[in-house]
Amino acid sequence: MLEAAIVGIGTWGQNLVRSAAGSERIRFVAGATGTPAKAHEFCRQNGIALSPSYESLLQTDVQAVVLATPHSRHCAQIVAAAQAGKHVFVEKPLGVDRNESTRAVEACQRAGVTLAVGYNWRFQPALQEVKRMLGDGRLGKLLHMEGNFCGPSAYRFSRGHWRHDAGREAPAGGMTGRGVHVVDAMLYLAGHIDAVSAQSLRLAQDFGMDDTTSMLFRFRGGASGYLGTVVATAETWRLQVFGSKGWVQLGDVEHLAKWDMQVCLLNEKLEKLRPRIVDFPEVRTERAELEHFAEAALARRPIAVPGGDEVHNVAVLEAIVASSKNQTWEKVR
């Protein structure tokens, strides 16, 4: 059992605590937050001892910290936790600066602690099956991927909320809150991205984050991709993967529980077969990712490593921001 502290006890931090309730691998016993009065009753009900600050929390005997804090704070908090000998699970994205993100990963490597980033889509059986279909040749050669992840995020937060800080916390609009999930799924299936072309606009409101962002990708393995994230519309998400032998599509409104997959393949005569739906069991991905982190931490096994997908995702985000500003294709460093 890994004894962990939750840092940032807002809506999502509370959701992470609830998702781990009853787990035999991870238990939340402590916490810290910038708004302790709002979190007091929740912590009392869940047996969480509140520390007055993050710094004081790191002096306790908890084995790990789970960070559900603003994006720009992640890297410094990770480094501090590593120096205190704590394992770290951080909500996505790892950071908003590639160099800072690299330093955070390297700090955990030096300290011998496990670092994981909250990309919970990888725990969906449907996405895992798409990866197997690419690996065993059922989809043929990977040609192209396209996805979107949309919803009313821009409307959920009032003027002045940190999530509307377009400069530090929400560069390229919905990318930090939503789009990075789709990028991570694409990295899982296709490997790293070589270059991006992007545009990012604020159309629905007169303040805050951009709400309409779209990108083109060139993958190092040769495939192409498209991603759109609109955060001033109704909920929807989709990921469609095209191979030389057919395509698969994932997507619906809900994205945290049950995924199905639509499959359409060519037969030996290159004739289209009828699309079919493949059903998969429901998985609570937040619990799955936390338990995966706990198992790795207890074994002192690394998850996020230098040069890995977690840092590359931040580099992709940086390139998207630069491309939308400069109106050029940008190499991903």
Image: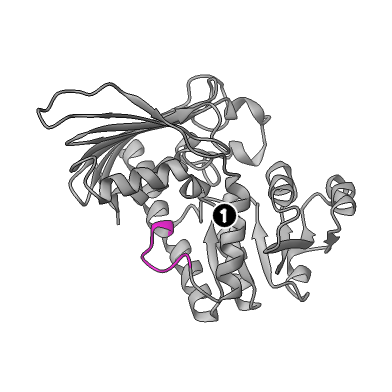
**306 falls in the magenta region:** yes
**Image quadrant in which the N terminus is located:** bottom right
Q: Residue furthest left?
A: 269
Image coords of residue 25 (percent x, y): 67, 64
Q: Is residue 329 left or right of residue 59?
A: left
Image coords of residue 206 (percent x, y): 56, 22
The reply to whether residue 238 is visible in this rendering is no
Q: Residue furthest front?
A: 268
Image coords of residue 31 (percent x, y): 78, 60
The reply to whether residue 48 is visible in this rendering is yes
Towards the viewer: 34 or 141: 141
**Callout 1: few (<14), some (14-19), or many (20+) C-alpha neighbours within 10 Å?**
many
Return the residue at label 1: 289
**68 falls in the magenta region:** no
Residue in view at x 68 percent, y 29 percent: 158
Residue in view at x 55 percent, y 80 percent: 111
User: Amino acid type of disc 1?
Assistant: Glu
Q: Magenta segment range? A: 303-310
